[in-house]
Amino acid sequence: MADAAGILEAREVCEAGQSCYTGPFKPMKGMSNLDWGMRNRLSRLIKADGHTQFLPIDHGYFQGPTRCLECPDQTIKELLPYADGLFVTRGVLRASVSPDLDIPIILRVSGGSSVVGEDLADEIITTSVEEMLRLNVAAVGLSVFVGSQYERQTLQSLAELVSTCEDFGIPVMAVTAVGKELEKRTSRYLGLACRICAELGAKVVKTYYCDEGFDKVTHGCPVPVVIAGGPKCSSELEVFDFVYDGMQKGAIGVNLGRNIWQHEHPLPMMRALNGVIHDGLNPRQAQEFYRELVSGA
Ligand code: 5RP
């Protein structure tokens, strides 16, 4: 019988080891033991080169209608084709982002404090796991405030969020936030905060770049690190410089908002940074590319 012969043949191939799937797998630090769904979600966010460019528009969750994010749909329209993930709250996602777009969502799931309140660090988890599933997210993001009055509360939120999300294969991105205390951004502090996030189960950590010792921050963290932006820099080159240096020192990409969409030329900035992250452009080459795009060359 033809069918039986086919089965026999298939078994022989299998015994010869030829049907065992051995890759290709992307280079993703600390990810070799993840279950399929968790890895697949991360794989949507981290591209074939192991790098990524997240576009954050979550700022309104604590600072209201941020400049250039008044109408988020208008701001992101031209940038989305170059973004590997969109970091956003559920409110703005539903109100301003089409569900028909093919962009992996990192849902901001912490909040509860504001720039006019007592303390920015006083955050709690604001979103349920049912909501994460309903919105078909690729990952969720939550801030922790190490060294603040709310250290324990925010680290407990991270640990509980990881426990919940593990059951559903949803990766958690921890954000090492400093609130208004920008001077905290030293390698010693950032290294400590990133490592704690990874130890509590974060699959990706977003942290600030620092001039001195950033390699210690990334090397001390067993999961991928993405670079956060911070306030707008004074020149394009300054942005390309810190992103390039951060990537050389072990970051896998960025989560950069204001330095892109508050810039005079958001699309050229987005594309030039994409060149640094995915095409290996150095800061001078990125600046040249940026200028070509601005001049329409
Ligand atoms: C706000 C955030 C933002 O995602 C983060 O700060 C990145 O944006 P920017 O580059 O504008 O700083 O986590 O809490």
Image (cartoon, grey):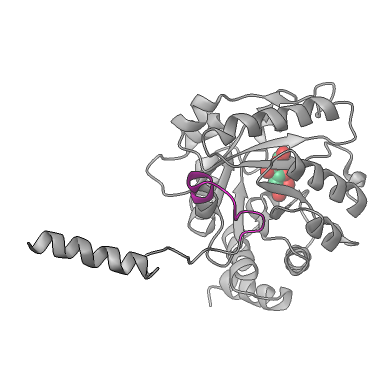
Near-viewer residue (155 or 145): 155
Q: Quadrant of ligand 1?
A: top right
Q: Where does the image place residue 183, in percent across and percent down from the top left?
A: 92, 46
Is 3 colored magenta in this rendering? no
Q: Which residue extends farthest left? A: 1
Query: Residue at image x 62%, y 68%?
Result: 272
Q: Where does the image place residue 170, in percent across and percent down from the top left?
A: 55, 39
Residue 40 visible within the image: yes
> Could you tell me what secondary structure mostly forms the magenta stretch?
loop
Q: Where does the image place residue 143, in percent across and percent down from the top left?
A: 73, 36
Q: Quadrant of residue 283?
A: bottom right
Residue 62 visible within the image: no
Query: Residue at image x 63%, y 44%?
Result: 68
Find the magenta span and give its range. Answer: 28-40
Q: Quadrant of residue 17?
A: bottom left
Count of picture labels: 0
Q: Is residue 291 left or right of residue 6?
A: right
Is the residue 228 above or below the residue 251 in the image? above
Near-viewer residue (227 or 181): 227
Is the residue 46 above or below the residue 137 in the image? below
Near-viewer residue (167 or 145): 167
Q: Quadrant of the N terminus?
A: bottom left
